[in-house]
Image (tube, grey):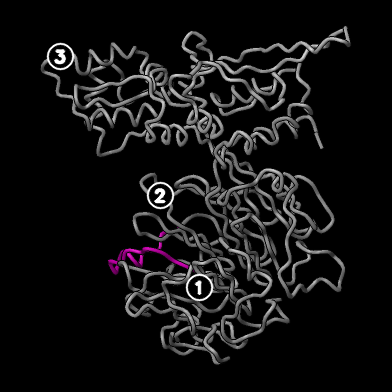
Amino acid sequence: MENDSFLYVTGAKEDLSFITKKIMSNLPKWTETKIKKTQTIKKIVCGDEIDFLVWKKPNKLEFYEQYKEKRKYQLPKNERIKDIASSRKTYLILTESGKVWSLANSNGSKEVPLRDADLSTYDKLRPVTFFEEKKLFVNSLTMGIYSGHYLCNGDQLYASGSNYRGALGANKKGGLVPLPVYVHDKVTKIFAGSAGTNSFFITSKPDLLYACGNNLNGELGIGSTRSQNKPAVVKNFLGSEILTVKSGNSHTILINKKGQTFSCGHTRKNGLGVEKTIFTLIPELKKKKAVQLATGLRRTLVLTDQNELYGWGFDKSLFPTDESNMNNRFPIKITLPGFFNIFLRSKGMIRIFSGSDVSFLCLDFKNTLSEDLRLLFESKKFCDCEIGTLGNKIPVHKALVECRTKLTIEQIQKKLFGQKNSTITKEQTLSFLKWVYYDEISEKDKEKLEQTFNSLKLTFPPSVDNTLEKDIARLYQDDDSKDFKILVKIEEENENEDEDEEVNYEEIPVHKFILLARSGLFRAMFDYVNEKDSTNKVQDYTNKSFESLKILIKYFYTNSIEQTTNEDPKLIFGELSDAVEYYQLNDQCNFVSELLKIKKQYDLN
């Protein structure tokens, strides 16, 4: 089952009409895009103006160019994308095999070591053969304006492209360096910004942060405004303290591992809040812990661990359109789409991306069923039976094991361990249970797992109809194996006002392990129940309607919200809006996105 993503964009109306569903004047607020999100968006990189490349699948990319049809690209099947970076008219794609591919336009692709760059018209992905020829394995890469940096063979830094004001750090005078040249060794991490003409990197011995390139506005943070064609040490920081560094046109933002946000460079052009030649803590963010950073030519976005978004810089799309407020010099809190503020509690759900004239906000909701069941398996709590040999038995949840295998516990025990010559070990049993609980079939355990499946006369590898999601969804229909009931209070009107209202209950049957896996509230409740006082029923005290709770319980099994025409959608939406927090569901579960589908379908406010 795929994860859900919501992708929002902000920018000028005239520029973004080709990707937005609604046209708003200058889009002062975030607007949902028309981009299909059938897979979780891994990364978006922006090129010149508002062109951008979207990475979704392991070896597939989508390119969006203003007023033109979407283009799709696919790497060879044996290649998997590791990262992508961009300059103004060039995108570099790094694969897990250490190879580099280019998507470029001939007007601006000279920074890439691509022999046929003059032929590039975004027509296809082209391999960058230089690294293979020199036997260089590329670990990571970054790009600035017309320049690229490549970390190769573990710790060797190379660079190519425009050496404007020493942007490459190769101790050469300005000019074009068409093929990568050596820059530095013992490098552990590299940083840049697609709108900057400088770069930063960390070394291991000594543990330092270095900077090179354009520094006319003090954007290198080295205490001067002298550009550096040879790497210079950034003052006041050790390399091991750095989370990320990104540069804009005339400014640089640094976030350390404590989440503190620092800036240096030119205030008047880019609105930094402070104007220094060394990295200085931004006062407005002093009490905030930053976890993500996105920079563009004239903008900066910072996301905190509390899902608060701050922005500053010349950006009419994020701020009021009053001319006096166009150049926001200090960070201000950016309004998120309404439902973001209602539902978001955990970090990691929001991701931010930015370019010179466009910014993206991506909200991810995940199918967390396998994660919930993995945690249940590891906790070993509330198991109701065991499988294995004497002295090596493993506690399990009977209904789940029988659901996945279509066998009874007794049959499993007999087939695996009932024979005198049984060779099934505890390690093999654990590998088998990893598949049962969370669909894991690791490469190293595949042979052992196949033997276990054969002993149970099950098909290996499992068919597409025997996935965790499908098995659990089918279990929802199996009322006979449900071992628990939730009692929902049904208040009935009493015609005699002198008598107390009669209270009745309706029952919702459920599997106990489902409640334990998917809801922290039920886990906590069962923790406090003494085994001698245990019961197969529990009363719900939330004052939710019977219909709402039935929808919630069905979601536990199916990861989707299905509503019948007999239910009031506004009532259901209102009653379940706090379900993630109240029932302590997984913070990143897709329950919220399912609920939002109802809101959109019925146009609820």
Residue plotted at (88% across, 7% down): 496
| Up/down of 369 relative to 101, above or below | above
Q: What is the x, y in percent for residue 546?
A: 69, 18
Using the rendered image of the protein, determine whether residue 270 is visible from the camera's viewpoint.
Answer: yes
| Up/down of 37 relative to 88, above or below | above
Q: Which disc number belongs to residue 110?
A: 1
**For the residues bearing labels 3 and 2, Cβ distance under 8 angstroms:** no
Q: Which of marks 3 and 2 is nearer the N terminus?
A: 2
Q: How crowded is mark 1: few (under 14 residues within 10 Å), some or many (20 or more)?
A: many
Instruction: State the separation of the CA atoms marked 2 and 1.
Output: 26 Å
Q: Position of 392 compared to 11: left or right?
A: left
Range of the magenta residues?
126-142
Amino acid type at circle 1 is: Lys
Amino acid type at circle 3 is: Gln
Q: What is the x, y in percent for residue 331?
A: 71, 69
Q: Which disc number belongs to residue 419?
A: 3
Give the mark toward the camera: 3 or 2: 3
Q: Earlier in the sequence, mark 3 or mark 1?
A: 1
Q: Is mark 2 on a helix, strand or loop?
A: loop
Give the mark toward the camera: 2 or 1: 2
